[in-house]
Amino acid sequence: MSDYVESDRLVLRQFTSDDADLLIELDSDPAVMRYLTGGEPSLSDDVVRDEVIPSLLAAYERWNGRFGLFAAYEKETGAFIGWFCLRPERTGPLDEVELGYRLRRDGWGKGYATEGSQALLDKGFTELGVSTVWGETMALNVSSQRVMQKVGMSVVAAVPTPDDMQGVEGAERGGFRFEITREQWERR
C-alpha cells in the first residue's frame, strides 16, 4: 500500500480491510468520542468491519484514490495515531472538500493534528484541484478550532448541532464551520 501523503513526522495511507481493529480501538475511547457521541463508541465492532471499512474502500475507488479517510502513523515508531480525512461530500463538487481528523489520546498535544491537516491542505491545493477546504467542530471543542486556525482556516458560519449529536455535552451551543480557499492558502 503506497502512502497518500507524508509530513515531517507522519505518514498517511489508505485503510485496508485488515484495519477494522484500529478504528474500533480509536472509537472506543470515551475521551476521543467526547464531542462526537458524548463518549460512547459510535458503532458496534461488526458495523465497523461489515459496513465502515467496505465504505472507506469504496470511497477510494469512487474518487480514484484522490480523496477519503486515511490512517495516520508516526514515522519514527510506526504507531497508528488516528485518521485524517480529505473528501468531498458524497454528491458534492470535487473541488470543495472536508478536512477532518480523529487522533488517539497518546497523539494529542504533539502537533500531529496541525501537521497532518497542513499536509492535506498542501496536497489538496497543489495536486488535487481543490478550491475550498472546510471543517466543522462543536463550539466547546476549542482544541479542534485551534488546529483549524493554525492551518489558516477561519470561521465562516455558526452551525447547529446535528440531531444525532443532541445528547453531547455543549450541543446547545452548536458549532462552527471553518474554511480556507486556495487563494487564502496561497497568500499565507
Image: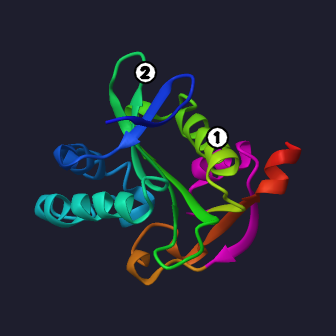
| Residue type pointed to by label 1 | Gln
Please provide percent x and percent y for residue 93: 60, 74
Q: Which residue is mark 2?
A: 75
Q: Is residue 32 left or right of residue 85?
A: left
Q: Residue shown at 67%/59% (left/top)? A: 130
Q: Is residue 76 left or right of residue 27?
A: right
Give above or below for 96 relative to 116: below
| Residue type pointed to by label 2 | Lys
Q: Residues within 10 Å of mark 1 (few under 14, many from 20)?
A: some
Identify the magenta region.
135-159
Q: Is residue 54 left or right of residue 61?
A: left
Q: As drawn, which residue projects farthest toward the left?
A: 46
Q: Is 19 in the magenta?
A: no
Please provide percent x and percent y for residue 165: 42, 75
In what quadrant of the picture does the N terminus appear?
top left
- Callout 1: SS: helix
Q: Residue shown at 83%/46% (left/top)? A: 186
Please provide percent x and percent y for residue 108: 48, 35
Q: Residues within 10 Å of mark 2 (few under 14, many from 20)?
A: some
Query: Quarter of the image holding residue 3?
Result: top left
What number is the disc on residue 146?
Answer: none
Give above or below for 69 relative to 116: below
Q: Nearer the viewer, residue 127 or 102?
A: 127
Task: Identify the colour scheme used.
Answer: rainbow
Please provide percent x and percent y for residue 84: 47, 48
Q: Which residue is mark 1?
A: 118
